[in-house]
């Protein structure tokens, strides 16, 4: 009887072990982003994408997530996607301008009045054509695209109530030409600083302030090295989940379909998550000890209008800009 029990146990191990082997993922992809885990919108989006991709692929595909810039800067990872040596990345759309200049239309100041307006644009033929052009031109395929947070001015010197209050500041800006031009239009000294160097640059006084979106700035603990936040909401920063077009094109149709479906699902989840978090995060800056004020936005809008004319030709012309503006009204 004892021998029979052992045989049954061995048979069960073979059966269930064989089933586990069959259920093991056939594809393990890598996804990188530059925000910390576990409590950042990028990481929550990455976890959701992993979950639904496993679901839609019937367990044939999964994701290994690399947060906090572990594998390099956003730009360097995007280059790896172009080369087909990396699969997925979540990043700021502002970083894509160096790969596809026309996407900088979404970096123009005061373009989006609210989160719902981004969703309108993403559903439009104008946006879909732009993303198709980007994939063809750069090899970067968009799976999810959202408005991730309004950008506001923080600094260590004084509250910002008018554009004149910005003129004396050394402002850190992302390495994006439109965002540099925005602060030059206000008369500030615009200093490009990478994400990884920002906290130290603020701490050491290399720059006086920055204008990251609220969720991003909170995840970077900006409240520890800044005294003032001014709710200018001068740009609704967009973020995207992108894939290597080269890698994607080599996958079986069923895996491609699962990836596209998971991307669409993630877009819906991520946009709702970002919208909800942005509504509460400003209070966290106050609790962190920062003084928060809300200046009149009209003078900032007027001062930054010159940026539209400066970059119109490079983002597809004034007609494309007007088309987007009509969509968000």
Image (cartoon, grey):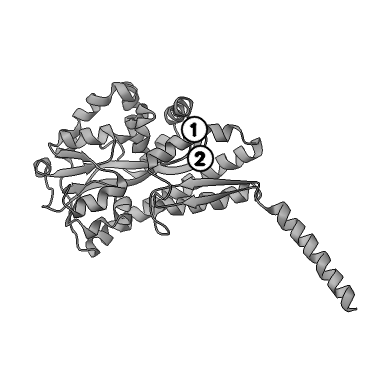
To which residue does mark 1 refer?
Answer: 83
Q: Which mark is residue 34?
A: none
| Left or right of 259, for residue 144 | left
**Front-most of residues 62 and 303:** 62
Q: Position of residue 141 (x, y in %)?
A: 49, 34
Q: Residue at x 33, y 25 (%)?
A: 315
Q: Position of residue 267 (x, y in %)?
A: 47, 44
Total of numbered circles in the picture? 2
Q: Position of residue 293 (x, y in %)?
A: 16, 54
Measure the C-alpha gap from mark 2 to mark 1: 8 Å
Element at badge 1? helix
**Front-most of residues 290 and 279:** 290
**Marks 1 and 2: in contact by CB < 8 Å?**
yes
Q: Quadrant of the C terminus?
A: top left
| Left or right of 290, for residue 324 | right
Q: Residue at x 27, y 47 (%)?
A: 212
To which residue does mark 2 refer?
Answer: 86
Q: Residue at x 29, y 35 (%)?
A: 176
């Amino acid at each position: 009887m004892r021998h029979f029990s052992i045989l049954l146990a061995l048979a069960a191990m073979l059966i269930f072990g064989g089933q586990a082997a069959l259920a093991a993922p056939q594809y393990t992809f890598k996804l990188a982003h530059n925000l910390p885990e576990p409590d950042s919108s990028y990481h929550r989006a990455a976890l959701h994408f992993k979950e639904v991709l496993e679901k839609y692929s019937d367990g044939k595909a999964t994701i290994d997530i690399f947060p906090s810039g572990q594998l390099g800067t956003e730009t360097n990872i995007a280059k790896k996607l172009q080369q087909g040596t990396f699969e997925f990345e979540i990043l700021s759309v502002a970083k894509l301008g160096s790969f596809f200049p026309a996407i900088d239309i979404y970096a123009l100041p005061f373009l989006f009045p609210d989160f719902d307006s981004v969703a309108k644009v993403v559903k439009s033929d104008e946006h879909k054509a732009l993303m198709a052009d980007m994939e063809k031109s750069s090899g970067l395929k968009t799976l999810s695209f959202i408005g991730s947070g309004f950008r506001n001015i923080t600094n260590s010197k004084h509250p910002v109530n008018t554009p004149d209050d910005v003129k004396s500041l050394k402002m850190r800006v992302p390495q994006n030409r439109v965002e540099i031009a925005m602060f030059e239009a206000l008369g500030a000294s615009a200093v490009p600083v990478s994400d990884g160097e920002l906290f130290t640059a603020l701490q050491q006084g290399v720059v006086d302030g920055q204008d990251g979106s609220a969720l991003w700035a909170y995840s970077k603990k900006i409240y520890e090295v800044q005294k003032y936040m001014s709710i200018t909401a001068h740009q609704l920063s967009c973020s995207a989940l992108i894939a290597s077009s080269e890698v994607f094109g080599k996958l079986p149709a069923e895996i491609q379909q699962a990836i596209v479906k998971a991307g669409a699902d993630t877009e819906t989840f991520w946009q709702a998550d970002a919208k909800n978090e942005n509504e509460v995060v400003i209070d966290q800056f106050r609790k962190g000890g920062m003084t928060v004020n809300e200046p009149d936005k009209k003078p900032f809008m007027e001062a930054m209008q010159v940026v539209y004319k400066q970059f119109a030709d490079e983002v597809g012309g004034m007609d494309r800009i007007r088309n987007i503006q009509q969509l968000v009204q």
